[in-house]
Image (cartoon, grey):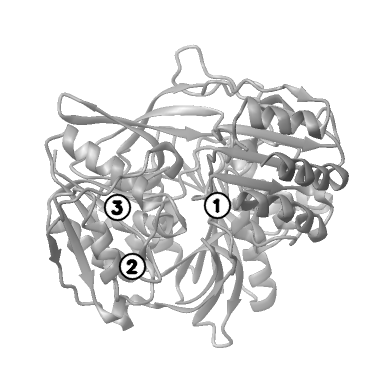
Amino acid sequence: MGNVIILCEHKNGDLVKQSLSAIKAGIDTAKATSGKSFLLLIGSGIDKAKEAASRFGADGVITVEDASLAGYTAEAYAIAAFEAVKSQSAGLVLATTSAFSKDLLPRLAVKLKAGMVSDILSIKTDGGKISGFTRAMWAGSMVADVEVSGDTIVATVRGTAFAHAEAVSAASPVTPVSVKIDQGALKAKSLEIIEHKSTRPQLADASVVISGGRGLKGPEGFKTIEQLADLFGAAIGASRAAVDAGWVPNDLQVGQTGKIVAPNLYIAIGISGAIQHLAGMKDSKTIVAINKDPDAPIFQIADYGLVADFAKAVPELVEEIKKVK
Amino acid sequence: MKILVTVKRVSDPEAKLKIKPDGSWIQTEGVKFVVNPFDEIAVEEALRIKEKQTGEVVVVSIGEKVVTEQMRAALAMGADRGIFVNYTGSYDSYDVANILQKVVEQEKPDIIILGKQAVDDDMGAAGFMLAELLGYPQAAFASKVEISDDKKKAKVTREIDGGLEVKEVELPCVITADLRLNTPRYASLPNIMKAKQKPVKEVTVDALGAAVKPRVTVKKLTEPPKRKGGVKVESVQDLVTKLKNEAKVI
């Protein structure tokens, strides 16, 4: 068993919070397999992220910094990640599941000739070796025990399935790895990032998520549930139907093919509860469902179900919560 | 312009699935199978590109003979011909990428479009593994694809965390289709009939010279613990009381 490398994500110079799940999973696995753990940061202008990454008690932080890596492309980052992984004889490469890691890690896996598993729920170790993983299949209706052969394994880690790593006082040493990227050979470039601006917390980070679906009948319906979100400082989520209809941006979709969340409180409003949506939220601690249809499947998994029209119930709920909060 | 599209046979997303008694896989008897919904979007996009640019849409499916049912569905949507890779063993994403690499080397398409993930295993890796094996650029999670006038580049809008990215890739390239790329067309009855006559070439993994040796294997399936829900509250006041006193989330 070799070392564990945890590829961390950064945004606007800061370490992305979701990476803390992979960091925790990676450091724990390294300890259980007598390997070393290294956090990997790729990019340009990442001093803050570097400093943050050095505070989790990993054996080291590896950085690949180059002006050519300022903008992300899977093509360039796979080259950079490969150089870093080679420098440490890694047996396991992890990253928290995200649009970034899903795009990048398969390319890295091929460079390493490694098997890859996506969105794992747990890592099993036996006698100091990794013995397998578990992961969800068929929209979370099954959990699979999976084995991966080979000297190196690449995996994305479901953020909600692992605790976050906690900062320690000792700083990990930082080792830079240099890489030459031939921009012309990449045949790809990022032209523009169109950010969906929001003052609300990210879905994956929020302790309360208020989600809306087809039952909200339009973008105005989302305005109504925003009042509720304001009370909790909650993130807004949506079912696929609401996103497909163009009522809210695509990255708010919760479910099998969108974001997987497990907040302390999840309130589903006007969402019928297709299995594909449940796959993205059924591990939430407390689930509340508000729906006009008493037979909506969402009620079967909700801790508290209220059969009501959202347009009447949500403003009432806002007033009642204000009274007791 | 030649476009290669992959079509995977998956259990109907609406199907209620059960595990085989030995836990090795799901019971497939009596389960309806369909084209992976993301692959349907990929086929539709390939057809739309062809309709603008002229050219050919070739569908690839891997598996036992039954997978040709889903391939015919793609041909009925309007794809021109199929390549059926007859393989009965188990395989992982890497194997799929190895097989597709050989098909691409024979067919030399300008664009390869796959669904962003298959809704059965939710792995979502084969497309990008293929791109890396071929040394092609990739555009993942596409919600809009524009081919340049000189047909040398694609400008792809893709769904990322926190918004969208516009990425430019040189052809040949690999694109994976996200939900908002298009709405797939229905196959008309005459086209379903016509699809039966469209050419499908059958090849084996050996004939292609592809290496298949799964690194990733599923050992056992279990059902996750069921969540106990189903409690209804009578009123908004009742709900707030329970959230405060029982769940303690307010």
The amino acid sitting under disc 2 is Gly
How many discs mark residues in the rendered view? 3
Foreground residue among B121 and B238? B238
Q: Chain of mark 3?
A: A
Of all residues, the one furthest to the top in this rendering is B21
In-front residue for pair A219/A314: A314
Label 2 crowding class (10 Å Cα cut-off): few <14, some 14-19, many 20+? some
* Label 3: few (<14), some (14–19) or many (≥20) C-alpha neighbours in 10 Å: many
Disc 3 marks which amino acid?
Ala
Q: Which residue is mark 2?
A: B135
Which chain is mark 2 on? Answer: B
Instruction: Using the image, determine if residue A212 lies above or below residue B183.
Output: above
* Secondary element at tag 1: loop
The residue under label 3 is: A109
| In contact (CB < 8 Å): disc 1 and disc 3 | no
Which comes before the other along the chain, label 1 or label 3? 3
Disc number for residue B207:
none
Q: Which residue is mark 1?
A: A203
Q: Is residue A72 above or below residue B90?
A: below
Viewer-side residue, B1 vs A52: A52
Q: Chain of mark 1?
A: A
Query: Between tags 1 and 3, which lies in front?
Result: 1
Q: Measure how far apart labels 3 and 2 are at the Cα level.
A: 14 Å
Structural distance between the alpha carbons of marks 1 and 3: 28 Å
Image quarter hosting the C terminus of chain A: top right
Q: Is residue B191 at least partly visible in the picture? A: yes
- Placement of the N terminus of chain A among the 4 image quadrants: top left
Residue A264 falls in which quadrant of the image? top right
In this image, A299 relative to A18: left or right?
Answer: right
Instruction: Give the alpha-carbon distance from disc 1 to disc 2, as whole Å.
Output: 34 Å
Residue drawn at x 78%, y 26% is B233
* Front of the two marks 1 and 2: 1
